[in-house]
Image (tube, rainbow, N blue to C red):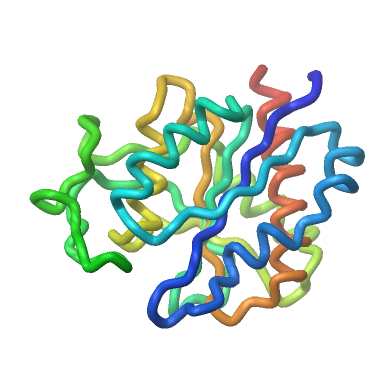
Amino acid sequence: MGTKRVLLTGFGPFPGAETNVSWEGVKSLNKEEIENELDINLFQEQIEVRYGFVDGCVPKLWAKYQPDLTIHVGVKPGITTLALESQASREGYDRVDTAFSCPVEQKHSCDGPEVIRTELSLKELEEQFNKSSPVEELKAEVSIDAGKYVCEYTYYTSLVHGPHCPQRTLFIHIPVNSCPKQIALCLEHMVRICLQQLKRSS
């Protein structure tokens, strides 16, 4: 299989999440330990909660790291599970970001399909994760609603970036009151399962 390149991102603060546990969880991963255990190169990056920042940052991350697997992590109020987002939409971004701005005409800046879906098998990921979740009270669940905010905008940006990106891109929403160390354990397990999928499909 060779050494795979894995990019994990979390988000910076925004109103209601002054300490964003998505980034706290991502940065809590033990990079050296996970790289050795899974034979990967792991990259951890923070994304600002601004549509304009996403437009410039996400393509640069793909170009810089050329990841075999990208997992974006964000928080979502009102959930108690790890939401495996299955798709992202091009339109409907009517909520202002931390710079009090929205995309022009509430549409993504990239041309692309109205809806684009990940090609990772999320049902399989859900089942495998839930059989062996490292945090008993945290289970995974497939979702079709990524929220029409900077999270979904980021997901769309990655999915539409290139012809092979849907095969290796995932967005996970986590509860806003999550424990970063528990999220780190769950993310490590998610990466492990996704890499197994990639190995079978290669």
Which corner quadrant of the image does residue 16 belong to? bottom left
Q: Residue furthest front?
A: 99
Q: Quadrant of the C terminus?
A: top right
Residue reaching furthest left?
105
Q: Is residue 195 left or right of residue 7?
A: right
Q: Is residue 122 above or below residue 50?
A: above
Q: Residue at x 34, y 57 (%)?
A: 50
Please state the horizontal and vertical placement of residue 39, each as a whole percent of the image.
Answer: 85, 32
Quarter of the picture containing the N terminus is top right
Image side of residue 54 versus residue 194, left or right? left
Q: Is residue 195 left or right of residue 19?
A: right
Q: Quadrant of residue 140?
A: bottom right
Q: Is residue 140 above or below residue 182?
A: above
Q: Position of residue 29 (x, y in %)?
A: 77, 56
Reply above or below: 199 against 175.
above
Q: Please tell me which residue lies in front, 175 or 41.
A: 41
Q: Is residue 88 left or right of residue 136?
A: left
Residue 139 percent across, percent down from the top left: 65, 67
Residue 72: image x %, image y %?
Answer: 53, 50
Depth check, front residue: 42 or 124: 42
Q: Image point 41% across, 20% down: which residue?
A: 163
Q: Nearer the viewer, residue 176 or 81?
A: 176
In this figure, what is the number of numbered marks?
0
